[in-house]
Amino acid sequence: MKIKMAGIDYRRAPVQVRELFSMTASAVERALLRSKEHAEVTGCVIISTCNRTEYWISGESEAFQQENPARLLCQEKEQDFSAYKEYFIIREGMEAVHYLMELSCGLQSQIFGDDQIISQVKHAVDIAREQEALDPVLETLFRTAVTGAKKVKSKVLLTNIDRSVAKAMIKLLEKERIFLEGKQCMVIGNGEIGRLAAAELVNAGADVYMTLRQYKTREAVIPAGCHVIDYHARYEHLGQMDVVVSATVSPHYTLTMERARGHMKDGEKVFVDLAIPRDIEPGFAELPDMRLFDMDSFSSLKYEGDARQIAVADEILKKYEEEYEQWYEFRDYVPVVKKIAKMAGEDTAARLKKELKQYGLTREERELLEKAIEKSASKVVARLCYGLREDMDKEEWKPCLEGLRRSAEHLS
């Protein structure tokens, strides 16, 4: 199975390494376009979230085995592969398929059972499709993984618990005995994570201000109970805030120490950086009475999945893995099945031509009926051939399909 992925995530790489490989949507688009310059790569999908960057590729030729997705990702990010290879994990074939199934439903997330990952996986596929970087192998793999994840979400109890970065932020602050009731909070960023964070802070009883760039005012969605302040005035409001959360996709710091110094006041302040690359300059943690949390801070939270529920999830996913493996091995026979079905339809219609002339039909009616017979017969034969895959073991249906292949070649 010619599928490979290279991933750099929270398990092996600290935030300062992960941010080197993170990608904005536009950077992902450029990378997908460039992936098509590699002759051995026929499909590519890139997943880039706050906790991971993954480079997925597929190919058809024997030379594909020489491709290294980790090296390709390093080339894309202009990083020295030898300096960072220890942080990567590379998976191939069914190991990669199994991993994607678990990833899509949150079993591989830092926040166990993460509810956001399924939409992030779907978004990655959508971008790849828009850039025409998908091939049938990855298209079908990711579609199957998302379908399996939805099934797990609907059947397994752990996925009914709302688990997201925003929820985890509240839990982290509670664990650190940082109480939010009546506190002044500012959220920098109006994207999905920023809105979720603002809503959770409101629910916790905080007085929440969300920054917004003026040109986005009309199209922005502001969570209920939030006040709005101009993004460019964020430093002026900094001194009044007890808690500051930043969650943007900016490649630059949204808060720097140099600009913040003149606006800070005495008293403890809490900064929460939910972005990769980081939004808040790390030096804030060194200032007196300042506490800074980033994405690696969530590693202190223990999100344990119930063993029974995980077993149920794995059993569900196993069916989708087997379904994909069957599809992958069967796809080489699809042209043969189509050819045999077409010949069967044509032969059936030809055998009935003489009989149809006896029913007094006009020539136009007879031709329409012949086409309908040909189409129906073709569908029946194709369904019987595809049914072999569903009702027989691989060791049985492969010889049958090989026989069909030889028959088709003799009849061509």
Image (spheres, helix red, strand yellow):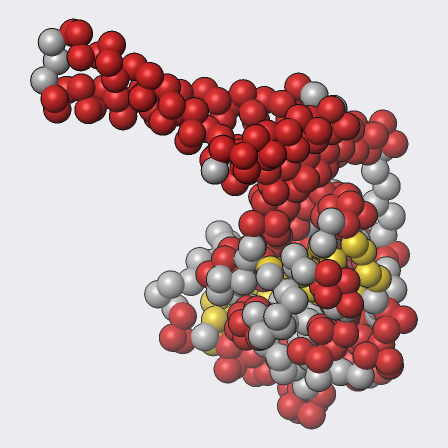
Whole-percent x, y for residue 222 in the image: 46, 58
User: Which of the two residues, 58 or 168, is positioned nearer the viewer here?
Assistant: 58
User: Which residue sits furthest top?
Assistant: 359
Whole-percent x, y for residue 29 in the image: 53, 70
Residue at 64% x, 29% y: name it.
403
Residue at 71% x, 73% y: name it.
73
The quarter holding residue 4 reads bottom right
Residue at 85% x, 33% y: name it.
306
Name the side, left or right, on which 106 lies relative to 410: right
- Report the number of numbered marks: 0
User: Which of the two residues, 327 or 32, is positioned nearer the viewer here?
Assistant: 327
Whole-percent x, y for residue 45 in the image: 62, 60
Whole-percent x, y for residue 119 in the image: 58, 49
Above or below, comparing residue 220 to residue 264 in the picture: above
Name the side, left or right, on which 288 lies relative to 354: right
The quarter holding residue 63 reads bottom right
Query: Can residue 284 be seen?
Result: no
Residue at 68% x, 46% y: name it.
104
Query: Can residue 1 be seen?
Result: yes
User: Which of the two residues, 113 or 83, is positioned nearer the viewer here?
Assistant: 83
User: Which of the two residues, 341 or 211, is positioned nearer the viewer here?
Assistant: 341
Above or below, comparing residue 216 to residue 351 in the picture: below
Above or below, comparing residue 272 to residue 97 in the picture: below
Name the side, left or right, on which 33 lies relative to 17: left
User: Which residue sits furthest front?
Assistant: 410
